[in-house]
Image (spheres, grey):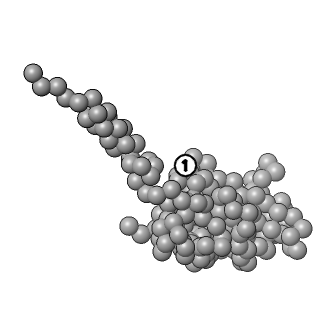
Amino acid sequence: MRTTPIAVPAVLAALLLLAACGGPDGDDGKPDSSPCSAATVSMEVGPASIAPAAGDTGEVPVGFTNQSAACTLDGFPEVLLAGAGDSESLDVPPTKGAKAQKLTLAKGESASFTLTYERGPRGDGSFDAENLRVELPGDSDGRTFRWTYGPVASDGGGGHKISVGAYQQVGD
């Protein structure tokens, strides 16, 4: 009678466990990476679909490309609108129902997110922004861009009608 050495079933079990977990590098089969940072990505705002008049909705895309080693985006971007001389600011919340996803960007890969806002009349509780500040999750540095899309409408409850969508991979 032949017997199978005990080492063979143990090795097979270990290989099956690794395969079920997506490989030794994590769930997605891509190597683990550090968070993306403003220092390692190029970033641009627009071109926007500007809300032309009070009550209209506009969309402002923010795109970026990883310029360095693989990095990860996990969560939502941190977006802030600043008023004149940064005297007041407005944190932009995630879009209701949006689901954050974890994206790993290799060097040269791109991602984007979109700000959706309703233009408001000057005054009347609208937020008159001058600058848009974008920070990536896990990175306290960021980039500041000029906000040229008009005042953001008040929601009537102390907030404003603007939100930030989840990250989306660009390309294949």
Task: Give the structural element (helix, strand or loop) at label 1.
Answer: loop
Quarter of the rendering containing residue 42 = bottom right
Q: Residue furthest top?
A: 1
Q: Is residue 52 above or below residue 36?
A: below
Identify which residue, 64 or 20, lies in the foreground.
Answer: 20
Q: Position of residue 93 (x, y in %)?
A: 69, 54
Left or right of 24 on screen, residue 130: right
Identify which residue, 70 or 4, lies in the foreground.
Answer: 4
**At 75% across and 53% down in the image, what residue appears?**
155
Q: Which residue does the numbered mark 1 point to in the structure image?
A: 99
Q: Position of residue 105 (x, y in %)?
A: 50, 65
Left or right of 55 on screen, residue 122: right
Q: How many marks?
A: 1
Identify which residue, 83 or 135, lies in the foreground.
Answer: 135
Quarter of the rendering containing residue 115 = bottom right
In which quadrant will I find the C terminus? bottom left
In which quadrant will I find the N terminus? top left
**At 38% across and 47% down in the image, what residue appears?**
22
On the question of residue 53 being in view, the answer is: no
**At 76% across and 73% down in the image, what residue appears?**
131
Q: Position of residue 154 (x, y in %)?
A: 77, 57
Amino acid of disc 1:
Lys
Left or right of 39 on screen, residue 65: left
Left or right of 121 on screen, residue 98: left
Identify which residue, 159 or 44, lies in the foreground.
Answer: 44
**At 66% across and 73% down in the image, what residue appears?**
39
Q: Residues within 10 Å of mark 1 (few under 14, many from 20)?
A: few
Q: Is residue 20 above or below residue 1?
A: below
